Amino acid sequence: MTGARCIGTELEQIDTSMVQVEAATIELQEAIKRVGGRIDGQDKRQTRHGQVTSLLHQTLQAEGAVAMGRDEQLGQELLDMKAEHYRELLNHERILNPMMAELEANKEGRERQESQIAELTGVISSLMGQMKGKH
């Protein structure tokens, strides 16, 4: 019986070891599931992060393109306004130059008239003085 007892004890130890291995296997499988769940969660977060980042990049590119378009449009409007302003200045110059020439001619004519008036005033004063002298 000693041999049978020895075998029985060894079988009990093997059964105990099998129970422990089974329990450890179950624990290990649960740990693997937990880690798998965490990895899945991280993968989902990483995927979401990638999607958000991609969307942000697309949004920034779109906004950049819109801003560039606005800048180009404003630049063109500014060039158009400058050209219009230049045309208006040329038109004003075209209108004002003859007026300035006419004013200058009128000024010269007025200066001649004033000179003639001063001359005539001197002649009249001289004649008045001579007439007083004869009376």
Image (cartoon, rainbow, N blue to C red):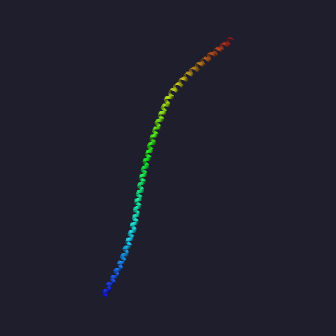
Quarter residue 79 falls in: top left
Residue 23 spot, x, y in % from top left: 38, 75
Vertical placement of residue 55 versus 42, above or below: above
At 36% from the left and 78% from the top, the residue drawn is 19
- Viewer-side residue, 87 vs 100: 87
- Viewer-side residue, 43 vs 98: 43
- Viewer-side residue, 55 vs 100: 55
Q: Quadrant of the C terminus?
A: top right
Left/right of residue 133 with respect to residue 66 in the rendered view:
right
* Residue lying farthest to the bottom in this orientation: 1
At 44% from the left and 42% from the top, the residue drawn is 73
Left/right of residue 17 with respect to residue 69 in the rendered view:
left
Quarter residue 111 falls in: top right
At 34% from the left and 81% from the top, the residue drawn is 13
* Residue lying farthest to the left in this orientation: 3
At 44% from the left and 47% from the top, the residue drawn is 66
Residue 42 spot, x, y in % from top left: 40, 63
* Residue lying farthest to the top in this orientation: 134
Vertical placement of residue 114 versus 29, above or below: above
Q: Quadrant of the N terminus?
A: bottom left
Left/right of residue 123 with respect to residue 31 in the rendered view:
right
Quarter residue 8 falls in: bottom left
What count of labels does the image hold? Answer: 0
Residue 82 spot, x, y in % from top left: 47, 37
Residue 96 spot, x, y in % from top left: 51, 29
